[in-house]
Image (tube, rainbow, N blue to C red):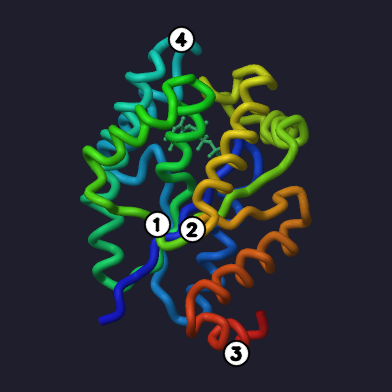
């Protein structure tokens, strides 16, 4: 059986990753793929418990390094128990955030440095990586307005300063430049439909066979 693919959506808060993950899964379902939409930190019982710990509480609840280790503890559980088994069954997995979030948030914005994050990554990930990463890029001021408009409880990261969110944007763009062979950047400020169409185009270009399947259903 053909193995599945892991597509990671990355970017700052409020850039529309969650909505687009659902839209892409619906499109892939429509052409006959089994899909799984998941998120980080989270995706398994244990990783969701870690998510609770890391997103709630005061801003200074965790240091940068404890935050990083919690993210990787959650990620290893997620990959071992959910992502790898799904890929083995031929499922297309869409993860709302993956390891480039650790690089951007803990490596750059929390100031741990790229080398520190890379060292932890190499020690625990056994070379595992997404088949494609899509970076949702937009002005953090506009993105944070969207977050406020949702009216949901804000996380330890949502309440950070605009400087923090600007650093994150620059970090993600820098990471995308470094890994231009596997990260595709899109303008997340375009309409929902335009962003969805662009994502389908990127997937069609990256995965032979998908373009033809999308064309059959009129994408
Ligand atoms: P979430 O509410 O899911 O944010 P969003 O909807 O923008 O994806 O919260 C996840 C938060 O965790 C987000 O602020 C980014 C942060 N995070 C890290 O700091 N490091 C990581 O490795 C991951 C996966 C997430």
Q: Tell me the number on the disc at residue 182.
A: 2
Looking at the rendered structure, the secondary structure element under dot 4 is: loop
CA gap, disc 4 and disc 2: 33 Å
Q: Which is more foreground, mark 2 or mark 1?
A: 2
Pick the front one: 133 or 96: 133
Which of the marked residues, 3 or 1, is nearer the chain's N terminus?
A: 1
Q: Which residue corresponds to mark 1?
A: 130
Residue 16 in percent (x, y) is at 64, 47
Vertical arrangement, residue 98 with respect to residue 8, above or below: above
Q: Which residue corresponds to mark 4?
A: 60
Q: Is mark 1 within 8 Å of ligand 1?
A: no
Q: Which is more foreground, mark 4 or mark 2?
A: 2
Residue at 77 percent across and 54 percent down: it is 190
Q: Which is more foreground, mark 3 or mark 1?
A: 1
Residue 105 in percent (x, y) is at 50, 29
**In the rendered structure, are the residues bearing label 2 and label 1 in contact, judged by CB atoms less than 8 Å apart?**
yes
Vertical arrangement, residue 93 with respect to residue 17, above or below: below
Q: Tell me the number on the disc at residue 216.
A: 3
CA gap, disc 3 and disc 2: 27 Å
**In the rendered structure, are the residues bearing label 4 and label 1 in contact, judged by CB atoms less than 8 Å apart?**
no
Residue 210 in percent (x, y) is at 51, 80
Residue at 62 percent across and 86 percent down: it is 215
Which of the marked residues, 4 or 3, is nearer the chain's N terminus?
A: 4
Looking at the rendered structure, the secondary structure element under dot 3 is: helix
């Amino acid at each position: 059986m053909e193995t599945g693919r892991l597509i990671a959506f990355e970017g700052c808060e409020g850039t529309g990753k969650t909505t687009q993950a659902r839209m892409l899964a619906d499109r892939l379902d429509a052409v006959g793929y089994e899909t799984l939409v998941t998120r980080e930190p989270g995706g398994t019982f244990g990783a969701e418990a870690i998510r609770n710990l890391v997103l709630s509480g005061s801003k200074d609840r965790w240091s940068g390094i404890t935050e990083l280790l919690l993210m990787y503890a959650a990620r290893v559980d997620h990959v071992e128990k959910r992502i790898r088994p799904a890929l083995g069954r031929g499922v297309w997995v869409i993860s709302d955030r993956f390891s480039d979030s650790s690089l951007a948030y803990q490596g750059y914005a929390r100031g741990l440095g790229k080398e520190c994050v890379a060292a932890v990554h190499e020690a625990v990930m056994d070379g595992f990586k997404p088949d494609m990463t899509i970076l949702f890029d937009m002005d953090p001021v506009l993105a944070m307005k969207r977050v406020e408009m949702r009216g949901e409880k804000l996380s330890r990261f949502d309440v950070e300063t605009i400087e923090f969110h600007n650093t994150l944007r620059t970090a993600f763009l820098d990471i995308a430049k470094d890994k231009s062979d596997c990260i595709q950047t899109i303008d997340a400020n375009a309409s929902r439909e335009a962003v969805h169409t662009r994502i389908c185009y990127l997937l069609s270009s990256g995965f032979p066979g998908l373009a033809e399947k999308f064309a059959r259903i009129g994408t």
